[in-house]
Structures are given as structure tokens and as C-alpha cells.
Amino acid sequence: MLDLSVEKLAILAVVALFILGPERLPTAAAALAAPSGKSRSTPPRPITNFAANSARNSTKSTRR
């Protein structure tokens, strides 16, 4: 996986500042952070209880 230390992140930030400039850097940072924020705000999918569902299904099949 990526081995990002604080020093490497600081170097990346300085390089991005030089490339993008102070006017466009906040916009670019917000665009990069947007997908991360959206995934955190998405509620988790409900987890169904397999045992309870299988018990319900087995009682339904015996009633027929």
C-alpha cells in the first residue's frame, strides 16, 4: 500500500501549490475531497439477519 509520511504529504502540498497556484488550490482540494465526504455521509445498508430470515422461510414452506 502507499507509504505516505507527513514529510511526503508536505512535499506534495508544496508542489501542488507551485503547480496550481494559490487561486486554484482550494478548488482542487475541495474537488479531491468531495468523494470522500460523500462516502462518509452515505448511510450504511441495512444488514439482514440471515438466521431470522431462514427461520421465517422454513416455517412458510412447512405451512404450504
Image (cartoon, grey):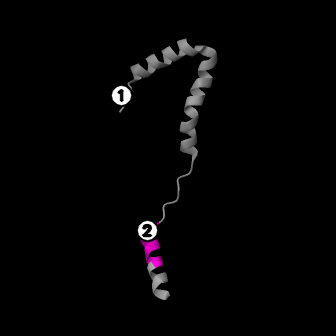
Q: Is residue 16 left or right of residue 54?
A: right
Q: Position of residue 34 (x, y in %)?
A: 58, 35
| Residue 18 part of the magenta segment | no
Q: Secondary structure at mark 2?
A: helix
How far apart, in angstroms, are the residues tagged by discs 2 and 1?
Answer: 39 Å
* Residue at 54% across, 13% down: 19
Q: Position of residue 14 (x, y in %)?
A: 49, 15
Query: Pointer 1: what residue?
Result: 3
Which residue type carries mark 1? Asp
* Residue at 47% across, 72% down: 53
In which quarter of the view is residue 18 placed? top right
Q: Is residue 25 left or right of residue 4?
A: right
Q: Earlier in the sequence, mark 2 or mark 1?
A: 1
Q: Position of residue 54 (x, y in %)?
A: 43, 74
Q: Position of residue 36 (x, y in %)?
A: 53, 37
Give the number of marks: 2
Q: Indicate whether 13 appears above or below 55.
A: above
* Residue at 60% across, 15% down: 22
- Mark 2 surroundings within 10 Å by alpha-carbon count, few (fewer than 14), some (14 through 19), many (20 or more): few
Callout 2 touching callout 1 (CB < 8 Å): no
Q: Is residue 61 left or right of residue 4?
A: right
The span picked out in magenta is 49-57
Q: Indicate whether 25 appears above or below 61.
A: above
Q: What label does residue 50 carry, if any?
A: 2
Q: Indicate whether 43 appears above or below 51.
A: above
